[in-house]
Image (cartoon, grey):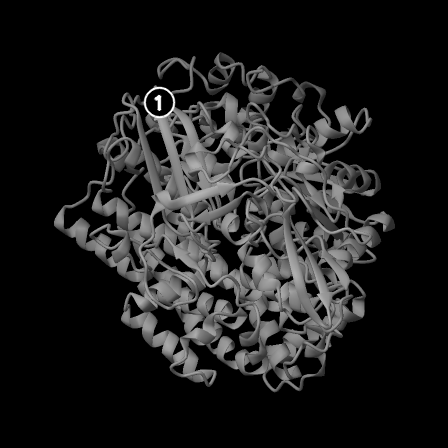
């Protein structure tokens, strides 16, 4: 048995260590350790509920918008505002579309790309177009300079890199293009929200102002460029790369339970009617189940909090204190993590305490089972393209996670202009209310579930005496990167790692691949 | 081939290089026909591209996401051609021990600029570890070996959000950590606050240091005066409405549609020193006040405690009539540096700020303007 520790896991948001045992070329056990803690729920207590969303969106600077949404919605529902003004709904959808627009592109190329695309191998390509020649010259100059920057010290000689040189060059070119293109979505978000990241146009009760027609048109033009990139570059890249990496379908299956709260509200504001609807899938059976925000439970036996803090409690009943840090598991030596080994609490669902995978695969599978025609078509087309027509179960794998993110990016960009057009319709009809003043003098409890790009995100709050009495956020990484629960059941990433092949334990590229498919 | 001529900046033609230098010159306030050649000359004298080690500690990655929103130059050009981003956990291909190898190689070479994003966990050191090293160990080591250290974003400058009361992990900004926990009595750290930290600020500071071969003049909070010398309020496009007594009373009202002043719904522009209304954000498309939301004062230390509640009026401000912008600051204890206020109001009046290089080393410019401590 060989112990393999990767710390830091790079190309993610946050700080993560993965510890695995490897035997006979396969991962036999795995532990994930979040190595950073900030204490949001602690310092959010006793604050002004109207401004609490400004704190909440700083939980994640990569995905501030869904945190902002859930925070204002949790406060709104606590104060008895069941529905958003319709034009506020559309503006929030537009903001979310910009978030999704940049985020999935960034993940596909910048965060995930180096696991499959061998940048130095692009020097062996024989490009014919001036633009590809220029990119190759740029790569050559970087390599020749000896200052490899972000490309330094990677396992480029690993046999797991399968693309021919021409394709390595082309995707490297798209990596550079994606860096510029993602700005289009962020600019659109900034135009409406003031800046990106950390927007400024949300407030409990609605949004701060109605954008002008020129701003709405700017958004449309930017998001049309995002759609063009996804349609003409990112989707073709997925289909071009996939045949070289079909082995990705054979590992990384995970727990087989999927959860999404849904994202992007239609006019009904019914979470089961969202563009990506709410729902769950249990025990690997591709059947649609309901998903209830109050069935979320947290456990702390293996996390650095006192054991009684979680122990199967609803998020609002879990105190983040008292913190009970014991010791970071050692990197070197034979010792494996035991007892407490994670700053993340174990999040489980329902009385069965199921660990749930969240993320685009959950979102796409639930939309597929909910009968969303465009998602169904894209999934079926993708399956056909990889020679798996009629076999959606093959998506329960690393391949499925990668493909689902691209499908999700496409569906989002296909619909991004629709929200703007509906808003223009509302303006034409004089339906311009974007804000309802809330009465903060009463006490109440509220909650909101609305997925972040990387998966199910929910916020819960109890407001008492016009102050935040309790606040709880359950972000997607708390689901996917759950440690073992009190019964010893592994979290989704831990489970997905088991069985991952490792050709060379000193160069654990395959482990990185499985971890990155979760966008942890 | 053209790119060989400019081998320091891979793949960039001479013409594009000069064009980039022209844009960069404007970023640090150089103008006139010699601006681009001055920048070009400084960059060409470098033996290699400036190496950057970027540490992410207790952060949300928002500052890095904003780095990817840089325009002068754009991110691909910036990361690969202008600088060598040798260590950044969210960007680099290598992971685990290979990533640690990159960190130690560059840091031990002592030939790098150090940029820190996020707070340093000093109360619970293990609340932030990377490769088994705590943020305290990494930050001290890299600071001591770097050519210059820039704290990007309010967390790295002053502790930021995780330092909000009761600061569960004892999070601190780089300067406070070095002074109070690392035994470095007088550290030199350039603070570039705001939440998120702004990419164009970072580029401007780096370039300033490279071109002028010295660090920019800093205010008492460690911020470059050429960027953080003025109140948001002084340059706000809605300032005329403040002076005219025209206020948004509630979001979505007529005043909101008219773009009136947000002071009554909580704007902290009168107490925050930042260039937002001048440089705006994300390719200058907008800024927080233009989106109809009040400024939350994110460039100021401890703004999470001191500038909140964010949607309630900042206390102690006399409303329009006979008040000057500097007095507004004084009323809040924010601009006890009347000298600074006056100096920069003067600069704004003569149009020098952001057009001419800042005047350096003037003793009268340095006064305390602690944000309401």
Element on which disc 1 rests: strand
Q: Is residue B129 visible?
A: yes
Residue nearest the observer in this picture, A176 or B177: B177
Q: How many marks?
A: 1
Is A402 situated left or right of A143 in this image?
left
Q: In the displayed structure, would residue A389 be above or below residue B18? A: below
Location of residue B321 in the rendering, given as x and y in whole percent from the top left corner: 35, 14
Label 1 marks which chain's residue? Answer: A
Q: Residue at x 46, y 30 (%)?
A: B296
x, y (%) of residue A198? 47, 42
Apparent side of residue B361 relative to residue A15 in the rendered image (left or right): right
Q: Quadrant for the C terminus of chain A, please.
A: bottom right
Image quarter for residue B19? Answer: bottom right
- Give residue B177's quadrant in the image: top right
- Seen at 86% across and 49% down, the residue is B108
Task: Judge left or right: residue A273 versus residue A410.
Answer: left
User: Is residue B13 something one can see in this rendering?
Assistant: no
Give x and y (percent) for residue A135. Answer: 64, 74
Residue designated by label 1:
A464
- Residue at 31% x, 57% y is A217
B71 to B271, vertically: above or below: below
Q: Is residue A271 above or below residue A71?
A: below
Label 1 neighbourhood size at 10 Å, few (<14), some (14-19), many (20+)? some
Residue B88 spot, x, y in % from top left: 68, 52
């Amino acid at each position: 048995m060989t112990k393999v520790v990767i710390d830091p896991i790079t190309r993610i948001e946050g700080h993560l260590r993965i510890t695995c045992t490897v035997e006979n070329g396969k991962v036999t056990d795995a532990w994930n350790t979040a190595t950073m803690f900030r204490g949001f729920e602690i310092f959010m207590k006793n604050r002004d509920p109207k401004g609490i969303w400004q704190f909440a969106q700083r939980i994640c600077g990569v995905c501030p918008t869904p945190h902002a949404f859930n925070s204002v919605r949790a406060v709104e529902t606590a104060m008895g505002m069941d529905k958003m003004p319709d034009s506020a709904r559309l503006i929030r959808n537009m903001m979310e579309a910009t978030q999704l627009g940049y985020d999935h592109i960034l993940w596909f190329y910048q965060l995930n790309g180096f696991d499959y695309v061998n940048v130095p191998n692009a020097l062996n390509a024989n490009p014919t177009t001036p633009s590809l020649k220029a990119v190759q010259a740029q790569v050559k100059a970087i390599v020749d300079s000896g200052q490899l920057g972000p490309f330094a010290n990677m396992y480029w000689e690993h046999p797991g890199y399968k693309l021919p040189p021409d394709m390595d060059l082309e995707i490297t070119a798209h990596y550079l293009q994606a860096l510029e293109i993602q700005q289009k979505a962020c600019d659109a978000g900034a135009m409406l929200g003031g800046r990106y990241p950390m927007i400024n146009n949300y407030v409990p009760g609605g949004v701060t102002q109605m954008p002008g027609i020129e701003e709405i048109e700017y958004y449309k033009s930017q998001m049309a460029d995002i759609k063009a990139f996804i349609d003409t570059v990112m989707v073709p890249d997925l289909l071009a790369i996939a045949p070289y990496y079909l082995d990705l379908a054979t590992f990384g299956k995970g727990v087989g339970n999927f959860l999404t709260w849904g994202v992007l509200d239609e006019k009904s504001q019914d979470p089961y009617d969202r563009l990506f609807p709410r729902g769950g899938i249990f025990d690997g059976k591709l059947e649609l189940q309901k998903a209830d925000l109050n069935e979320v439970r947290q456990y702390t036996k293996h996390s650095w909090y006192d054991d009684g803090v979680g122990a199967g409690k609803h998020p609002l009943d879990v105190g983040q204190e008292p913190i009970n840090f014991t010791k970071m598991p050692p990197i070197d030596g034979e010792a494996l993590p035991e007892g407490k080994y994670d700053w993340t609490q174990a999040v489980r669902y329902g009385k069965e305490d199921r660990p749930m995978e969240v993320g685009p695969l959950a979102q796409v599978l639930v939309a597929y089972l909910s009968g969303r025609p465009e998602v169904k078509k894209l999934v079926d087309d993708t399956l056909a393209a990889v020679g798996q027509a009629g076999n959606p179960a093959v998506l329960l794998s690393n391949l499925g996670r990668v493909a689902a993110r691209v499908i999700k990016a496409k569906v989002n960009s296909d619909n991004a202009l629709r929200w703007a057009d509906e808003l223009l319709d509302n303006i034409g009809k004089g339906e311009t209310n974007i804000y309802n003043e809330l009465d903060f003098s009463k006490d109440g409890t509220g909650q909101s579930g609305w997925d972040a790009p990387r998966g199910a995100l929910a916020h819960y709050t109890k407001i008492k005496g016009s102050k935040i009495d309790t606040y709880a956020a359950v972000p997607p990484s708390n689901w996917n990167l759950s440690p073992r629960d009190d019964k010893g059941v592994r979290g989704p990433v831990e489970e997905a790692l088991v069985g991952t092949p490792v050709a060379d334990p000193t160069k654990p590229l395959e482990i990185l691949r499985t971890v990155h498919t979760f966008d942890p | 081939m053209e790119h060989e001529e400019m081998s320091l900046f891979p793949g960039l033609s001479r013409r594009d290089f000069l064009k980039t230098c022209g844009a960069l010159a404007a970023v640090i306030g150089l103008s006139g026909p010699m601006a681009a050649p001055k920048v070009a000359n400084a960059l060409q004298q470098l033996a290699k591209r400036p190496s950057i080690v970027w540490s992410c500690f207790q952060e949300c990655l928002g500052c890095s996401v904003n780095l990817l929103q840089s325009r002068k130059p754009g991110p691909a050009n910036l990361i690969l051609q202008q600088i060598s981003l040798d260590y950044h956990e969210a960007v680099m291909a290598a992971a685990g021990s290979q990533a640690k190898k990159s960190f130690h190689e560059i840091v031990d070479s002592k030939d790098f600029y150090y940029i820190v994003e996020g707070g340093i966990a000093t109360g619970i050191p293990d609340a932030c570890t990377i490769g088994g090293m705590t943020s305290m160990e990494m930050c001290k080591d890299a600071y001591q070996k770097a050519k210059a250290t820039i704290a990007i974003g309010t967390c790295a400058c002053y502790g930021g959000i995780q330092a909000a009361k009761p600061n569960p992990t004892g999070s601190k900004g780089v300067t406070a950590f070095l002074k109070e926990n690392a035994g470095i009595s007088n550290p030199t750290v350039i603070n570039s606050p705001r939440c998120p930290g702004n990419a164009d600020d970072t580029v401007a500071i780096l370039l300033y240091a490279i071109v002028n071969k010295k660090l920019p003049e800093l205010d008492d909070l460690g911020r470059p005066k050429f960027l953080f010398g003025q109140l948001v309020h002084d340059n706000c496009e809605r300032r005329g409405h403040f002076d005219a007594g025209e206020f948004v009373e509630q979001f979505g009202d007529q005043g909101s549609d008219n773009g009136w002043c947000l002071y009554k719904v909580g704007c902290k522009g009168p107490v925050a020193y930042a260039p937002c209304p001048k440089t705006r954000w994300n390719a200058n498309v907008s800024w927080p006040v233009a989106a109809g939301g009040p400024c939350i004062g994110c460039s100021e230390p401890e703004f999470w405690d001191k500038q909140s509640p964010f949607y309630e009026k900042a206390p102690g401000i006399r409303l329009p009539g006979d008040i000057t912008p500097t007095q507004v600051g004084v009323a809040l204890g924010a601009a006890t540096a009347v000298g600074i206020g006056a100096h920069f109001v003067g600069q704004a009046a003569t149009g020098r700020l952001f057009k001419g290089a800042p005047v350096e080393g003037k003793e009268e410019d340095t006064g305390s303007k602690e944000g309401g401590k």
